[in-house]
Amino acid sequence: MKKQFNRDMININHIAVLLMLLSSLMFAQNKPIRFDKFTTSDGLSQNRILDIVQDNHGFIWIGTEDGLNRYDGYEFKVYKKEPSDTNSLADNVINTLHISSNGNLWAGTSFGGVSKFDYDTETFTNYMSDNFDPKAIISNTIKDISEDKNGNIWVATFRDGFDYLDISSNTFYHMENILPKGFLLTNQSLNFIHQDKQEYLWVGGEGKLNVFKISYSDSKIPRLQPIKVKNQIFDIAPSCIEEDQNGDIWIGTVSSGLFKYNRLENVLEPFIIKGSENDFENIIVTALETDLKNNLWISGLYYKNGLDDIDLEKPRVLKVNLTNYEIQRFQYDLNNESSITNSFIQKIYSDRSGVLWFGSDISGISKYDNSVIKFNLFKPKK
């Protein structure tokens, strides 16, 4: 009887655990959406967020207009330029961040070129423009950073096109040295640069999206061949780019909405979901990000009669399920302090655990953990 009793108790315990799990799951599915906020009152150096990344150690790095921030899950550590220290951050305005395949953190600044962080010494190696050095970076005003298959770095600048950094020689190759002879960008004021999984380079700037097929010379220096893509010219500019888990390319624009690249037809196609056309019309797309669950997150500003006439009643962020194309809208709620920020979102980042980080223009960071259920673990007292 005792053995039978134990088995019954075990079965009862299993059923109880299952009921608790089901109850928790049902609660989690109906739980209110909560955004946790981080501002200067929590230790951020500044509330204007320009970029967010996660490094190989799990740290979250945040670029602001006044310093580089490292978040360990508990507190922020701030790195700033020290005028008397050449191994400090080159500039406090951090426009873009990139974690390279070998784990290095690269920071593109507004006035100091590119800074690479050394984890052992917590110092920076700085790459700055030098008119007397042809191997130096072309400009100190950096807009975006990407990487090629060899671990070398692409750098897009604000008004001087783009460069390619060969890591082994610390040599910057300017775009005119890797583009076909006589080829010129229509505008050298750039918003982004991205090398995709198919070894195409995407360069977005005022008026046009440039696409190049990449090959390599015997010296391992890239050679770029321009590719004509239908619908690659825009009224104002492509603003951001995202490559999803399937290798699909998404392009956000300032005044033309959202586009998805059709590789088979070599065309940028406007992305609109039937029945939800209003979500993709009259929108300035400011950021794109795909998460671990194959959702595309879109932040933007909707306008009415012109780009200066912003519609504050529209949602700040959209989440599009790329499997069934369901849309979830996130809007600021004055009566709910856990809603998303009222400021417009400049950056969206999905970390390795699936947590979403939203960087705003004046209100710091909103953090959204969309996990279905969490467990609190307790250690028994000894």
Image (cartoon, grey):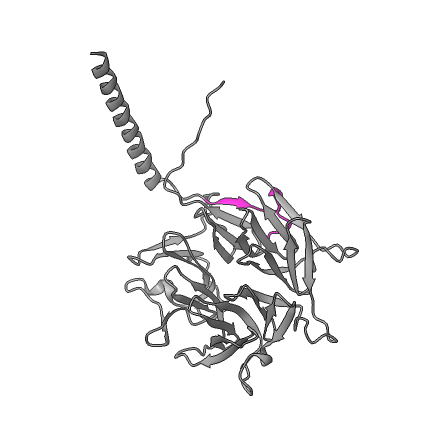
* Residue at the image point whose x is 28% and y is 30% from the top: 18
Residue at 54 percent of width and 54 percent of height: 52
Q: Residue furthest right?
A: 84
Q: Which of 159 and 293 is in front in this view?
A: 293
- The verdict on residue 366 being magenta is no
Span of residues in magenta: 35-48
Q: Where residue 98 appears, x then y in whole percent?
A: 56, 59
Q: Which of 181 and 306 is in front in this view?
A: 181
Viewer-side residue, 329 vs 348: 348
Res. 119 visible in picture: yes
Is residue 146 shown above or below 23? below
Relative vertical location of residue 121 with respect to residue 157 in this rendering, above or below: above
Q: Is residue 184 left or right of residue 89?
A: left
Horizontal and vertical percent position of residue 177:
59, 80
- Compare residues 66 and 120 and report the one nearer the observer: 120
The residue located at (41%, 54%) in the rendering is: 291
At which x and y percent is residue 21?
31, 33
Q: Quadrant of the N terminus?
A: top left
Asked if residue 47 is among those painted magenta in the image, a careful observer would answer yes
Q: Position of residue 345 (x, y in %)?
A: 50, 57
